[in-house]
Image (tube, grey):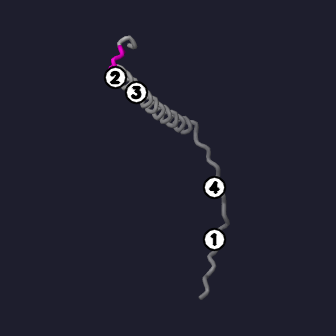
Amino acid sequence: MNAQRIELPPFQSAPIVYPSLGRAIVDSSLTVGRTVLIGGAGLGLLIGFAMVIAIAITSAAYLLGFDVTSIL
């Protein structure tokens, strides 16, 4: 059984197409927006964890009999 050879056109590379200025601005602003959103969420989580740890430490100190009102 002989397979037939298929003739294809020669390979041509795709032309390089640069985005327009408007598209570049939109893409970069979306990237910056995403970065700020994720960074802000991460910062909020860090602040939240710090508050939980601070409350836990002050609660433990209060239960042990220390005066924690001077910390505030």
Which one is earlier in the sequence, the residue at label 2 or at label 1? 1
Tell me the residue that label 2 is attached to.
59
Q: Quadrant of the C terminus?
A: top left
Q: Quadrant of residue 58?
A: top left
Q: Amino acid at mark 3?
A: Ile
Which one is earlier in the sequence, the residue at label 4 or at label 2? 4
Q: Quadrant of the N terminus?
A: bottom right
Q: Nearer the viewer, mark 4 or mark 3?
A: 3
Q: Nearer the viewer, mark 1 or mark 3?
A: 3
Residue 2 place in picture, x, y as percent? 61, 86
SS at circle 1: loop
Residue at far bottom of view: 1
Give the side of residue 23 with respect to residue 67, left or right: right
Disc ID at residue 8: 1
- The residue at 52%/37% (across/down) is 31
Q: Amino acid at mark 1?
A: Leu
Tags 4 and 2 touching, CB below 8 Å: no
- The residue at 63%/55% (across/down) is 14
Which one is earlier in the sequence, the residue at label 3 or at label 2? 3
Disc ID at residue 68: none
Please determine whether, in this image, residue 12 is positioned above or below residue 69. below
Q: CA distance from mark 3 to mark 2?
A: 10 Å
Disc ID at residue 53: 3
Q: CA distance from mark 2 to mark 1?
A: 77 Å
Q: Nearer the viewer, mark 4 or mark 2?
A: 2
